Image (cartoon, rainbow, N blue to C red):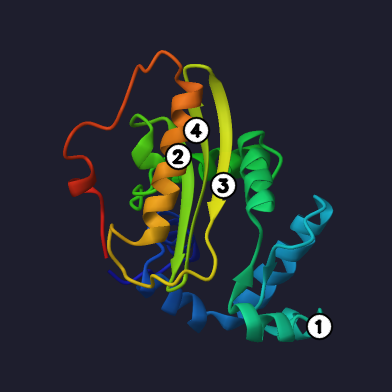
Amino acid sequence: MRCRTLLAIVTMLAMMATASCADTMAELKAGMDKVASEFHGTLGSHGFKQTRLLNGKKCDELGLRPLQRKWGLGMTTPNEMARLLELIRDGKAGSPASCDRMMRLLSHQYWDDYIASQVPPMRAANKTGAIDGSRSDVAIVTAPAGEFVFAVYTKGQADESWSKANEGDRVIRTLAEIVWRHFDPEKTWAPPPGALDLLPSE
């Protein structure tokens, strides 16, 4: 499927991170320079110091090209992503309407095979990430004992496979299961038998 509008591109990137949309975004380079400028300005106003888009003219203007050579198109930390999710949830990452829309998109992820796979359906707003040597997920989860924000990032994985058995995938699922059990002391829910077999996979 070819993404045609910026809204469609952002929606598909948020929900599925499709290669088609990433390619189309690369074609919209002039627009990306404006997006990068607004992105850095918004995050800077909230005190974010480690989250950066590392592409376009702003990368050179801000002296970020060495970081781009090291990290690729962007960089962040688990703590800043957890904080960003809290700002979105609280309606402070943008307009109330845009934050509401972002929460809706984050609550309908196609790639729900990490944290979201270890909590009941409809309880997580999350965003996963994956490259060869790293896996990541950040989520806001509603549990019986209260809401929690949880972020896990792996780095420098020896296992660069693209399967559900990837060591990073398994570590994130294991940690998510442990945290869910803490917030579900009465053990009201656990993944049903066979759930892992039905998770999305490359």
CA–CA distance in space, label 4 to label 3: 11 Å
Q: Is residue 131 above or below residue 116?
A: below
Question: Residue 22 falls in which quadrant of the image?
Answer: bottom left
Q: Which residue is mark 4?
A: 179
Which residue: 41% across, 43% down?
174
Residue type at the position of mark 2: Ala
Which residue: 37% across, 67% down?
18
Q: Is residue 94 visible?
A: no
Q: Which mark is residue 63?
A: 1
Q: How many marks?
A: 4
Q: Is residue 167 visible?
A: yes
- Label 3 vs label 2, nearer the camera: 2
- Viewer-proximal residue among 173 and 9: 173
Q: Which residue is mark 2?
A: 176
CA–CA distance in space, label 1 to label 4: 39 Å
Mark 3 and mark 2 in contact? Answer it, CB < 8 Å.
no
Q: Position of residue 61 (x, y in %)?
A: 81, 83
